Image: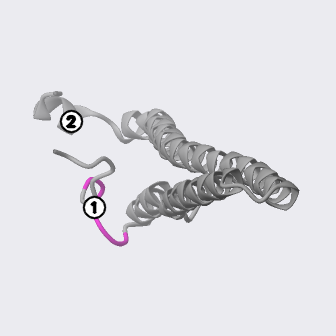
Amino acid sequence: MTDTRDRKSRSLFGLVGDVPKLVKNLVKGEVDLLKAEMIAKAKVFGLAAGLLVGALVIVLYAIGVLLTAAVMGLATVMPAWLAALLLAVLMLIVAGILGFVGWKRFKKGLPLTPKRTIDSVKDDINAVKGLGNKPGQHDRTPRS
């Protein structure tokens, strides 16, 4: 902390000289916030994409099993096709569950815009203009 006597004795030129450093620190902080927010969104979309790809792979295997069941059912009238059919239905159920969970995760990451960073930049612009909330009134990071 600087002493209040130092603040009173500083000239206008000294204060104006600090502006570039303060603006640089502000821009750096906003860029860091943007990076953190976009990394979080990328993680959500990465997991969602993995789940959706998993569902697609299982559906492709299920199609193969269904084809096998159809071939076995037509070739011979034996209970083997029934087992293959039940396995295919089970695989489709698992694919449906994975697809549903993946879709929910995908929607959780929407919209793609970095909302917290945009709000923070708007607050900074309003503070520079002398409008709106004082800086620091909105938390940029959630506190526990």
By what rule are the colours in the image chosen?
one colour
* Count of residue discs: 2
Tell me which label, 2 or 1, sits earlier in the chain. Answer: 2
The amino acid at mark 1 is: Lys
**Type of the residue with mark 2:** Arg
Q: Is residue 68 left or right of residue 143?
A: right
Q: Is residue 124 left or right of residue 62?
A: left
Cα–Cα gap, marks 2 and 1: 20 Å
Quarter of the image that includes the C terminus: top left
Q: Secondary structure at mark 1?
A: loop
Image: 108 above or below 57: below
Give the residue drawn at x 44%, y 63%: 119
Pointer 1 local density, CA inside 10 Å: few below 14, some 14–19, many at least 20: few
Figure quadrant of residue 94: bottom right
Which mark is drawn over residue 17?
A: none
Instruction: Give residue 2's quadrant in the image.
Output: top left
Q: Is residue 36 found left or right of 66 in the rendered image?
A: left
Where does the image place residue 104, in percent across and percent down from the top left? Answer: 49, 63
Name the residue that disc number 2 marks.
Answer: 7
Residue of label 1: 134
**Up-down: is 37 above or below 108?**
above
User: Is residue 114 within the magenta segment?
Assistant: no
Magenta stretch bounds: 131-136
